[in-house]
Image (cartoon, grey):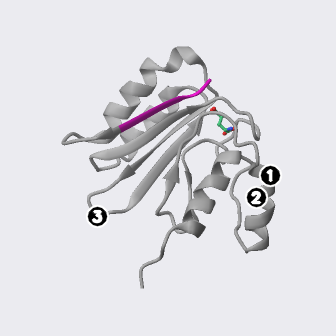
Amino acid sequence: MCGIVGYIGSKTAGPIMLEGLRRLEYRGYDSAGISVIGNDGVLRTLKSTGKLGKLEELIAEKPPEGNCGIGHTRWATHGAPSHSNAHPHTSADGTISIVHNGIIENASILRVRLESQGVKFQSETDTEVLAHLIDCLWPKGG
Ligand code: GLU
């Protein structure tokens, strides 16, 4: 079973989400990651396989600035435990970031449909399908 945390507030999101993920460690996981929206509006994603200590090192090396974020510990169902399959998953332009718990039953149908529209996938997960699907359906400004 995976764990999901989210934060929005006045504090720096990274350490708070890391603490939240620590509290969920008992549920078991194979990889972990976070996405944080910076004050510049850019999403930054850090993820790693294995224990949270590795993610903590990444956060310490390059602390993501920002007061809003999502975090995830993954229990793989679609694709091996790997860096590319770890959550969060993002849309191609990096403006949408997704974490998800469970299984998207029609993910393979949606994947084939999105691939036929030119979407390139970075992972084997069902979750990434959702990031691209939202991106395709999201009204684009013009
Ligand atoms: N089905 C998703 C995956 O394999 C989420 C698994 C989970 O609940 O952690 O990445």
**Distance between the alpha carbons at the discs numbered 2 and 3:** 31 Å
Residue depicted at x 18% and y 42%: 10
Could you say whether the residue bearing mark 2 is in a helix, strand or loop?
helix
Identity, as a three-letter code, of the amino acid under mark 1: Ser
* Residue occupied by mark 2: 111
Residue 132 point in image, percent of width and height: 62, 61
Residue at x-position 74% and y-position 34%? 77
Q: Judge the density around disc 3: few (<14), some (14-19), many (≥20) Cα neighbours within 10 Å.
A: few
Residue at the image position 68 percent from the left and 57 percent from the top? 122
Asked if the residue under mark 2 is in contact with the one under mark 1, i.e. CB atoms within 8 Å, the reply is yes
Looking at the image, tell me whether mark 2 or mark 3 is earlier in sequence order. 3
**Viewer-closest of 100 and 84:** 100
Which residue type does callout 2 highlight? Arg
Residue at the bottom extreme, as displayed: 142
Question: Residue 40 — which label?
Answer: 3
Q: Is residue 25 above or below residue 46?
A: above
Give the x, y percent position of residue 63. 34, 45
Q: Is residue 73 visible to the viewer in this orientation of the structure?
A: yes
- Find out whether residue 2 is within the magenta segment: yes
Pointers 1 and 3 in contact (CB under 8 A)?
A: no
The span picked out in magenta is 1-6
Q: Is mark 1 within 8 Å of ligand 1?
A: no
Give the crowd class for mark 1: few <14, some 14-19, many >=20 residues within 10 Å. Answer: some
The earlier-in-sequence mark between 1 and 3 is: 3
The label number, if any, that marks residue 108 in the structure image: 1
In this view, 82 is above or below 107: above
